[in-house]
């Protein structure tokens, strides 16, 4: 009888230690990660000059505003460094610094700045850029 109880206890310990803990990512964390990923996709579409890709990542009203300030360029190197993500009831704000180098007709323009990217809706789409927009150069 003692051996049976001992075997059950040993079996219980072995099976309880063998499972991996499943971590559930909070909804807020998912929203923050998604908005940062969206910002990087927008950067990729901008660098590739993919207007349709940009349009798919930006709200209709936001696209009108952002596209109105865009200028043509031959090539661009643009990097975003997210600094802070603020979750709001109506969306997500990603504060990010950026560094860019634009080339147009043999001239090079280098700029740095800090912008706040406002994402809204489901799925999250860029709605507005507050402060220094990187998309108004060269």
Image (cartoon, rainbow, N blue to C red):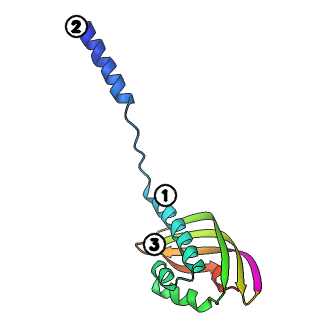
Q: Is residue 110 magenta?
A: yes
> Residue at 24% of width from left, 12% of height from top?
4
Label 3 SS: loop
> Residue at 61% of width from left, 63% of height from top?
84
Mark 1: give few (<14), some (14-19) or many (20+) Cα within 10 Å: few
Q: Is residue 132 visible?
A: no
Numbered-mark total: 3
Do the numbered discs 3 and 2 sit on residues whose CB atoms are within 8 Å?
no
In which quadrant of the rendered view does residue 131 lie? bottom right
Q: Which mark is residue 1?
A: 2
Q: Is residue 27 visible?
A: yes
Q: Nearer the viewer, mark 2 or mark 1?
A: 2
**Residue placed under numbered mark 1 in the picture:** 29
Q: Quadrant of the C terminus?
A: bottom right
Label 2 SS: loop
Which numbered disc flags the more N-terminal residue, 3 or 2?
Answer: 2
- Residue 49, above or below 80: below
Is residue 136 found left or right of 92 in the rendered image?
A: right
Which numbered disc flags the more N-terminal residue, 1 or 3?
Answer: 1
**Real-space Cα separation, disc 2 to disc 1, in angstroms:** 51 Å
- x and y, in percent, of residue 39 in the image: 55, 71
- x and y, in percent, of residue 81 in the image: 65, 66
Q: Quadrant of the N terminus?
A: top left
- x and y, in percent, of residue 60 in the image: 46, 86
Is residue 37 found left or right of 3 in the rendered image?
A: right
Mark 2: give few (<14), some (14-19) or many (20+) Cα within 10 Å: few
Q: Which mark is residue 124?
A: 3
Do the numbered discs 1 and 3 sit on residues whose CB atoms are within 8 Å?
no
């Amino acid at each position: 009888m003692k051996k049976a109880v001992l075997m059950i206890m040993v079996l219980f310990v072995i099976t309880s230690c063998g499972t991996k803990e499943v971590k559930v990512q909070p909804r807020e964390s998912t929203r923050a990660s998604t908005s940062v990923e969206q910002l990087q996709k927008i950067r990729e579409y901008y660098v590739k000059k993919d207007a349709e890709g940009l349009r798919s990542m930006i709200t209709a009203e936001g696209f009108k505003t952002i596209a109105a300030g865009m200028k043509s360029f031959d090539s661009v190197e643009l990097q975003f460094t997210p600094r802070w993500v603020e979750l709001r009831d109506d969306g997500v704000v990603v504060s990010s610094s950026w560094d860019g180098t634009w080339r147009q007709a043999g001239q090079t323009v280098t700029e740095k700045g800090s912008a706040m990217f406002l994402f809204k809706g489901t799925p999250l789409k860029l709605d507005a850029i507050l402060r220094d927009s990187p998309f108004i150069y060269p």
